[in-house]
Amino acid sequence: MTRSTTWHPESFINLTDYREVTEVLRRGREFVLEGTKAESDEFVHDTLISIDGRPHLERRRALMKMLTPSQPWGAEGHLLDEVFDDNLRRIRETVPPVDGAHHFDLIDFCRRIVWRVTAAFVGIDGIDSDEKVSWFLELAAPVLNTLVVEYAPEAERDAIVLRGREAREQIRREMFLPSIERRRALLRQAAESGGSTEDLPADLLMSMLADAGDGDTDLEPIFREAVALLAASVNNPVSQAAWSLDDLLDWLEAHPEGHAHTSEREFLNLAVKESIRLHRSSRPYLVRIATADTVLESTGRAVPAGSWVASWVGAANRDPAVFGADSDSFDPYRAPLDPKVATFGVGFGIGPHSCLGRPMLLWEQGGEEAQGIQTKLLRFMLRSGIRKDPGGVHELIGVEGGRRFSRYDVTLPAENTSS
Ligand code: HEM
């Protein structure tokens, strides 16, 4: 079913106060996602990011397996380590050093790493070389634009949808269906040999196919969920990798004693969380619809039934009443005034639709070696000597409340000159 709703942001109730934002996101019965999708509904209808209540909970549960730390992309796995090294090698081989260092764009570098890892946990096979990543990026980028099309200027929306539809069909034919066939064969083999499906990779496609059981499974819901997961997972880690390096390098200049901790998981996690609090880099606000006349307990604000509420994540995360008078500055050791508030604030959302990927990004259990994607990215960048290029371009794009670097030039010491 396709909706024809159009957004009217001028009628939205805009929330920027941390307490109000978190209350709305937490109260998933009174403030729902269902019905908020307009042009993007054709692409995300009935996926995790557009449903509520019990069906939503069950869908989340089905995807949990993907988050097991022992998976190659999980905190105990080594996929990110390998892909990072591959990309470092590629830079060394293809970008000739100038004045003792390779100069390159960190955004493109991290994008190639994150997309490869993402392809693995979604279950898109064969994205295992730089050429294949380029192909994947080229096709997936227009599809991802369709999923946030409501945030684009009205005049651009039709073109975004048309381009997205074409690319989506190509992804379905060339990537999704072959990956599904391979998984069906693996499931058949496991059934025939009496083996367990527990040993099969727990990517999204495999988890959903196994969940659907035998027979002629309708593949459309699986395809929709895969595309929605792609949209939720690829852009933020890339933007946040650049923000965390940028924030931490500046902070270390003023706090040289911090260098002693830059390989420690706990310190790196703190730094990553503080950058996530400070920088909302994608959709500037999260939208919900009030299902009933509601009064917010935190402030007494009355919200009439049917209101569209926009929760501004970035503003809430800089609320001085929660994060202190210096809430605009980066401090990895920041302690929110209310100890119950997470140091990353509402950076991963909160409540029933909070970020499913968080344990994959930031892992805080087990030993030092078990680390999330975001933590490892920061550690590997620092360890390999990647630094902001003082003579390079560092360009910010996006709208107020959702800013990210489109390009962030860095240097990497050439091997024969590094010491
Ligand atoms: C630093 C990186 C990331 C940030 C800052 C981030 C942030 C967020 C936020 C704020 C939401 C809440 C959206 C809402 O309430 O409407 C969310 C939801 C979500 N995120 Fe992330 N995310 C990140 C990376 C990832 C990754 C790597 C995955 C991969 C599994 C992922 C999967 C999801 C999913 C599936 C949802 C929707 C959950 C639901 O509706 O139940 N995210 N994320």
Image (tube, grey):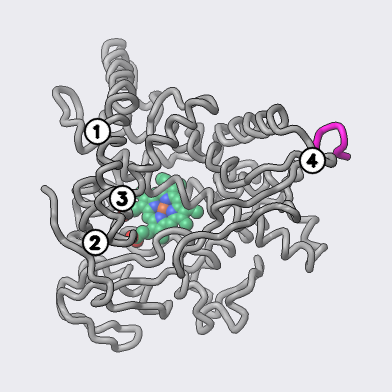
**Whether residue 283 is situated above or below residue 334 in the rendered picture:** above
Residue position marked by numbered label 2 in the rendering: 33
- Dot 4: what SS? strand
Give coordinates of residue 29: x percent, y percent. Answer: 21, 67
Residue 292 visible within the image: yes
Residue at x 51% of width, y 32% of height: 72
Residue at x 37% of width, y 46% of height: 231
Residue position marked by numbered label 1 in the rendering: 211
Residue position marked by numbered label 4 in the rendering: 101
Residue position marked by numbered label 3 in the rendering: 147
- Dot 2: what SS? loop
The quadrant of the picture occupied by the C terminus is top right
Please provide the residue range marked out in magenta. Answer: 414-419
The mark lying in front, picked from 1 and 2, is 2
Q: Residues within 10 Å of mark 2 (few under 14, many from 20)?
A: many
Of label 1 and label 2, which has the lower sequence position?
A: 2
The mark lying in front, picked from 2 and 4, is 4
Of label 4 and label 3, which has the lower sequence position?
A: 4
Residue 357 visible within the image: no
**In the displayed structure image, the side of residue 346 where residue 189 appears, left or right:** left
Kindly check if marks 3 and 1 are in contact, taking CB atoms under 8 A apart as contact.
Answer: no
Give coordinates of residue 191: x percent, y percent. Answer: 27, 16
Mark 3 to mark 1: distance in Å? 25 Å
Give coordinates of residue 85: x percent, y percent. Answer: 65, 32
Q: Amino acid at mark 3?
A: Leu
